[in-house]
Each structure stands twice: as C-alpha cells, then as structure tokens.
C-alpha cells in the first residue's frame, strides 16, 4: 500500500540555477522558474524545501527599489505556489543566497538564526518541531558551500558542525538531557568520501580536465604533483556522527540510484559528473529514511534535485530516542575508516 502524505515527511533540496533567471518584464516570472516551482516542486508537496540559488529572490541593502520589489514579488509567489512559509538567509559575499520553505501543517516553527560571518553564502537556518514530539527541536539548514576556496569551505564546514553539535549531548545515557535532531542539506561544492560511491572519482590529471581554475577550487595539489578531490565536509560530518540519507537509502533500502550524480552534466572541462548536492542527518532521524530519489533537472538547471522521504512513524520514534543511534561512518564503510593525523581517509 502506497504511503499517504500523513504517513511520510518529505525533504527536498533544489539548486535552481540562478533562481530561473531574471524577470522577463516587471511582474512576469521566467519560464524556468515556473516549470521548477509549478511543475516539479508544487506537485511533490515537500514538507521542508531547501533552495540554494535564490539569486533574484533576495537583495542586498543597497539594492534599488525596483530590485527589492522584484525580489519580494518572486518570494511571495514562491510561497503561494508551494503553500509553504519561506525563510530567506541574508546576503553574503556570494550572489546566490540560500533559503528554505516549511509546511506549517507538518511542523511548528521555532526561531530563524542568521550567520553573518565566515560563510561566503550564509545558510538558511530554522528550528522546527514535530507536533507529536514538541519537546525536541529539529535544527535545519540549507547551505551552499563556497565554490572558489577549499580553505573557505573548511571554515564553513566547522561552522556547520556548530549546528550538528546540538545533538552531541544525546550520545550519552542521561535521558534527562534535552534531545535535538539536525538536518543539513546543501550544495557542498565538494565530493563524498569515495567508499561505496557509484559515481567514479574525478581524474584531475586527465586531458579532458581543461578548466584548471575549477581544478584549483575543487582539488588539493599533493606533494608529488597529483591532485586529490576535496572531501573535507563529508569526512567532518561522518566524524561528527552525521549521515547522508542517499547512502542510507542505497545500503538499507536497496536504492542504489540514490547515489546518482547531481551535478557536472552541464559543465565542460571540469572532470565529469559528481554527487555534490547532499544531505546530512543525525544518527537517529537518518533511520527514518524510506526513499531517496534524484530528480532530473536537465534543461532547467545545472543541478539535479534530491527528494528524501521519511517515515513519519519512524521519525517520531527517532525523536523520542526509541532505538540506538547509527554509529559514525557506519554507512561509508563496513570496517570503519583509517584516518591520518591530517584527517585524510584511506579505504
């Protein structure tokens, strides 16, 4: 029997390239935006939606009145089409801000937090609660890691662990301590630890890699002159006991397609397709994952979207800590990783 909307909670991450483009004329939204929101997102009826390129839905303080009015028009239209409440992160140095939407019939809303420092593009960070377990906050964030700086992404990754840290106290046996959950979804601009992945690693020395600036943004030059893909965020999240729902679906729900590439299909000279759009969930709520799908966005965006379906019953049990947590790295390798002092992982 197919699960009804009351039986599941749906989390979606979409990177709609440059927000679908500018208005065709004042008040007329671009066709790519309409196809994404009206044709894909609205029928999916997500309960939580992270958007990582709200280029024309948010403005800087110095924007013109016309630009601010256009951004507000688009933002209100998105909420109306989706039937969800939206939260925009503040602008950072990057020009593609983050945002997220929440279905108020599914969650009660806590505070929105802003992160003005460190992040090139600040995450949209909103705390939610499930009505059945109102005492447990769910810390959620939509993020877009810096595209141009491996060192910048390291700093941003550590800042994201401050959100995952809300779960830390629950790893002990003290049941009186307050519980918390954490969901982080975003365009990582990095690669997953390759153990168990379906998408081949990029050979950065291959002649097909002609975008050498992109290589410097996405890989680290080794002492012998070779290149190693940046995987720092994934390693850090795994060390912190966070888990990728796509890995969970592939290993525990027999859904290998969950590990399909999400980007790179529209780029030339950058090394091919890769799985850079990912989610991370705490060690309890990850076990509520029922299904993970990669939504084909070819023709609309340079990234595919991710659709994560959770069992509502299992999510309630997870928030109540009715079963043990999933061990760190459990989904990345059966035997566990071997990690050097520098944090590099060796299978």
Image: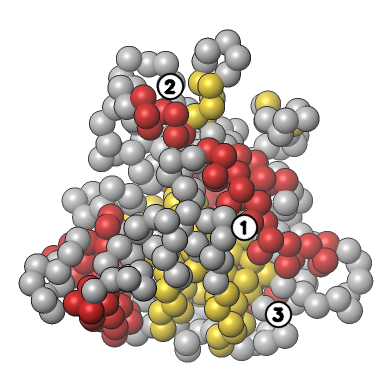
- Which element carries disc 2, helix, strand or loop? loop
The C terminus - image quarter: top right
Tag 2 or tag 1, which sits nearer the N-term?
1
Give the alpha-carbon distance from disc 1 to disc 3, as whole Å: 20 Å
Name the residue rendered at 81%, 67% in the picture: 170
Residue in front for this viewpoint, 34 or 200: 34
Which of pointers 1 and 3 lies earlier in the amino acid sequence? 3
Judging by the rendered image, the residue that carries numbered circle 2 is: 204
- Mark 1 near mark 2, Cβ–Cβ under 8 Å? no
Number of residues whose C-alpha sits closer than 10 Å to that of mark 1, classed few (under 14), some (14–19) or many (20 or more): some
- Give the residue displayed 27% in from the left and 57% down from the top: 18
Disc 1: which residue? 160
- The answer to whether residue 91 is left or right of residue 241 is left
Q: Earlier in the sequence, mark 3 or mark 2?
A: 3
In front: label 3 or label 2: 2
The percent coordinates of residue 161 (x first, y second) are 67, 56
For discs 1 and 3, the disc positioned in front in the rendered view? 1
Residue 289 visible here:
no
Marking on residue 136: 3
């Amino acid at each position: 029997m197919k699960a009804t909307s009351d039986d599941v909670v749906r989390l979606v991450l979409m990177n709609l390239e440059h927000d679908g483009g500018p208005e065709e004329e004042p008040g007329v939204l671009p066709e790519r935006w309409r196809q994404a929101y009206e044709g894909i997102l609205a029928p999916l009826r997500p309960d939580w939606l992270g958007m990582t390129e709200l280029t024309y839905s948010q403005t800087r303080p110095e924007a013109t009145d016309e630009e601010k009015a256009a951004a507000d028009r688009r933002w209100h239209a998105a909420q109306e089409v989706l039937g969800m409440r939206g939260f925009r992160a503040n602008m950072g140095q990057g020009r593609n801000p983050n945002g997220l939407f929440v279905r108020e019939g599914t969650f009660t809303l806590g505070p929105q937090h802003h992160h003005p420092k460190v992040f090139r593009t600040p995450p949209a960070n909103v705390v939610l609660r499930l009505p059945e377990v109102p005492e447990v906050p769910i810390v959620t964030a939509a993020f877009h890691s810096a595209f141009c700086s491996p060192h910048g992404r390291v700093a941003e990754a550590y800042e994201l662990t401050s959100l995952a840290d809300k779960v830390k106290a629950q790893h002990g046996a003290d049941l009186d301590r307050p519980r918390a959950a954490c969901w982080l979804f975003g365009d990582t601009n990095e690669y997953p630890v390759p153990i168990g992945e379906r998408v081949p690693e990029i050979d950065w020395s291959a002649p097909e890699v002609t975008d050498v600036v992109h290589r410097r943004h996405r890989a680290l030059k080794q002492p012998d002159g070779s290149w190693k893909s940046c995987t720092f965020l994934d390693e850090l999240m795994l060390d912190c006991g966070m888990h990728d729902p796509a890995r969970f679906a592939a290993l525990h729900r027999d859904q290998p397609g969950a590990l399909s590439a999400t980007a790179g299909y529209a780029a030339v000279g950058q090394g091919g397709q890769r799985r850079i759009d990912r989610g991370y969930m705490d060690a309890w709520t990850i076990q509520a994952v029922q299904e993970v799908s990669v939504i084909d966005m070819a023709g609309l965006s340079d990234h595919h979207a991710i659709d994560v379906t959770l069992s509502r019953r299992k999510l309630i049990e997870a928030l109540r800590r009715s079963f043990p947590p999933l061990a760190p790295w459990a989904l990345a390798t059966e035997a566990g990783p071997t990690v050097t002092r520098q944090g590099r992982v060796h299978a």
